Amino acid sequence: MGKKGTVLVIGGGIMGLSSAYYLLKDGWQVTVLDKGDFTDNASQGNAGMLVPSHFVPMAAPGMVSKGIRWMFDSKSPFYVKPALSWSLASWGLQFMRSATEAQVQRASVPLRDYHLFSQQLYNDLQNDPEFDFKLQHKGILMLFKSVKAGEEEWQVAQKASELGLDVALLNGKEVQALEPHARLEVLGAAHYRCDAHLDPSLLCSQLLQHLRHKGVELRSQSAVTGFSITEGVVREVATNTNTYQADLVVMTAGAWLPDLARKAGLKIPVMPGKGYSILEPLGSKPMLHPSLLVEAKVAVTPFAGFVRFGGTMELGAMDRRINMKRVEGILGAVPNYYPDFRPVIPPLEKIWFGYRPCSPDGLPYLGYARGLKNLIVAGGHGMMGVSLGLGTGQLVAQLAMGQRPSVDLSLYAPDRFQ
């Protein structure tokens, strides 16, 4: 747009809060709507990893065959809930078309740049005395137990090196030397020293506190019910409690993005990928590095005095049911890599779950909506929401000001499936 004014941000997750933060810095008058209370989004309970290492989108060669195989294992990392759903079938067909080597090649550099840009913003924000979300640059260990998994990690690490990312292949003894307090049973690891991690709950709460202190209107329990659009401009946004007018509208909303977009006449396919996490005391033998258990697809993140185990991708309609088989799959995998850690199944109220917003090609949506002059879409970040969070917020602000984005956004057009 290139002109400051009023902006309405829809969605109180990491994308919405980050967008509000940078728009506020640029002088916009900001209101944020959240259908909940700003605490029940997918950013709160995730692994908190910043991952330039994730330059390969989820829609990649081999994922289709793996997904089909995993569907028959109740504890597997990936699961599609059987349902007579046109949106699920359509999403699946688009996923299969996107899972090509050509797609991976096209996406690798843009995704790398997006992650690195976002990570630098986290570095800058952590240096602000108002913020301390425990950002640590220890890298992430991709731990593997089998020769096959090691060969696959070596191939990805080789590509990462070609992209200029800092990564090292380690054998079992070298991995153990990095973790002197936590016994490991692994064949080796790829150590992505370019990666980092933080406490996502602290990040979100501190962003909320900052926005509230700076006078941003934070409207909870405000579900959008419709848009009034004339001559390609969003004139009003109606909610269950009020009606809002703004010069600019930013649509985030996470896994609820498709329904929200439909109300504005847009088609933006996203499937909710339910994931689970469990937070446990670390005990007397601390972990120093976060890790991804390669074969099990489980994330392990140490925080101050605690460790979070998380994983699974359960695609299908949203519900509040906790699938204990998925939780058992996560926790049961941990002792295979960390034999001294034997997490027990917690009571239901101690199990966190959230919905990752997954696009069919594994790439985010970011840019102005086709045919709408004052609506920016920012969503569909899948498992990379926190990693790309601040970067997305800054890019939204740049788009709002009519500036050239700091990274190439050509692959992320919101209308690419229309």
Image (cartoon, helix red, strand yellow):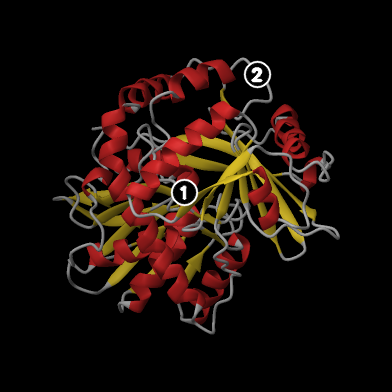
- Reply above or below: 412 against 44: above
Q: Is residue 82 left or right of residue 7?
A: right
- Residue at image position (86%, 60%) is 284
Outermost residue, bottom side: 129
Residue 303 lies in quadrant? bottom right
Tell how many labels: 2
**Closer to the camera, 60 or 386?**
60
Task: Identify which amino acid the numbered label 2 is placed on.
Answer: Asp
On residue 210, which mark appears? none
The x, y position of residue 361, in whole percent, is: 35, 34
- Reply above or below: 122 against 115: below
Q: Is residue 118 left or right of residue 236?
A: right
**Closer to the camera, 68 or 187?**
187
The x, y position of residue 210, in whole percent, is: 51, 77
Image quarter hosting the N terminus: bottom left
- Reply above or below: 146 against 388: above
Is residue 341 visible in the rendered structure shown here?
Answer: yes
- Residue on which disc 1 sits: 384
- Residue on which disc 2 sits: 73
Q: Secondary structure at mark 2?
A: loop
- Residue at image position (39%, 56%) is 115
